[in-house]
Amino acid sequence: MQANGLDERTNLLVEEYSTSGRLDNITQVMSIHTQYLESFLRSQFYMLRMDGPLPLPYRHYIAIMAAARHQCSYLINMHVDEFLKTGGIAEWLNGLEYIPQRLKNLNEINKLLAHRPWLITKEHIQKLVKTGENNWSLPELVHAVVLLAHYHALASFVFGSGINPERDPDTSNGVRLIAVNNFCVCDLANDNNIENASLTSSNFGIADSLSELEALMERMKRLQEDKEDEEASQEEMATRFEMEKKESLLVINGAFDDEIVSTDVSRYIEDPGFGYKDFARRGEDHLPTFRAQDYTWENHGFSLVNRLYSDIGHLLDEKFRMVYNLTYNTMATHEDVDTTTLRRALFNYVHCMYGIRYDDYDYGEVNQLLERSLKVYIKTVTCYPERTTKRMYDSYWRQFKHSEKVHVNLLLMEARMQAELLYALRAITRHLT
């Protein structure tokens, strides 16, 4: 990193510490990408601390409910503290049966947003806004939906980046990094090369991963040339999307046993067995296609969310654009590389797993650019983040730097958040019309 980039990063971290009184590991890892971090902190600060439809304790309790869907105790514990600091009622932390009915009513939309957002309908919205004394106003509901989507996606980032608690409960004072998954936040934040950390202990030689890198760059170059030569027909593009969607369901399907949920987390979860996996086992017919141009973030979602919860639309839009366009024009040891096709493939593959299709995108590119080990990683981080392992993180792009893999995690996080918001906001729009 150049000196001025390091200064910018230091200033941002100092500012965050002075504002929130803590410098959590999420912030430290994201600080590798200072431009993005600034955008992230601005939007998170707004939804948690600035004027808005929901009382402050509600905001943190909703964050707890969202994080619990993926058993993310790191985020749960963080927001338990914040909930109490903002005047939350301690009894609510005993579990969902102790909270007001109004908050309980969010359980269904929390569950659907986290695992199968395509099932959300205007009826779910009507149920929430027309429940007598426990009803939600539309601005309150939009605030809640933004928080739920934010914390589902942030759980993906936490597990994908192997982020661990800052404090070691065994030490009475001081802070120590705990490497639960053998990740170390200091490795990520200092951008130590993957080859130093993981290649030495793997069965693959550096020569193998170098040839993988060269092959990927060659495929990117060939795609660019093919695009200039000929364009696939609309029918062919639709077929490629359906093939990719169908194939995505088979990636790691059934590879896991049902996990046991700890009681600390289960108190905040209703219907813990509900997940993305249930749908995948039943087959692809149950995932309808959401045609992106029929309801886009830019033309529909953005204006609705801004109208009902002022300014958050601008902040989210800035964050989505930032991550989508973020590039250093490098790939591992190579410089002056246009990574646009790769970034787009990562973003669109996440949306593909949620049934969202872009008519102008050739999904053949996803197959060309994303190797199977990367697809397994993407699907796990996006759909079952609590099952992400260090081995998955190490197994793809073995010549790439940690900062580049953190960049991948940022793309996955924002693509997931946007997908959830599109389904929820479309249902709210249908309720309004």
Image (cartoon, grey):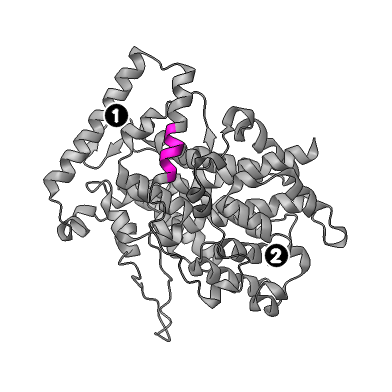
Provide residue 163's location: percent of width, then percent of height. Answer: 40, 63
Provide residue 113's location: percent of width, then percent of height. Answer: 61, 51
Write down the residue under mark 1: 220
- For badge 1, the amino acid type reads Met
Q: Is residue 36 left or right of residue 117?
A: left
Earlier in the chain: of badge 2 and badge 1, it is 2
Q: Nearer the viewer, residue 254 or 146?
A: 254
Provide residue 402's location: percent of width, then percent of height. Answer: 30, 52
Disc 2 packing (10 Å; few <14; some 14–19; many ≥20): some
Asked if the residue at tag 1 contacts the one at tag 2, i.e. Cβ–Cβ closer than 8 Å, the answer is no
Circle 1 SS class: helix
Write down the residue under mark 2: 58
**Residue drawn where x is 69% and y is 36% of the image:** 303
**Residue drawn where x is 19% and y is 53% of the image:** 195
Q: Is residue 129 left or right of residue 427?
A: right
**Residue drawn where x is 62% and y is 53% of the image:** 112
| Residue 368 in view, yes or no | yes
- For badge 2, the amino acid type reads Tyr
Task: Indicate the quadrant where residue 63 lies.
Answer: bottom right
Provide residue 312's location: percent of width, then percent of height. Answer: 65, 46
Q: Which residues are magenta?
A: 243-249
The answer for how far apart the CA atoms under marks 2 and 1 are is 46 Å
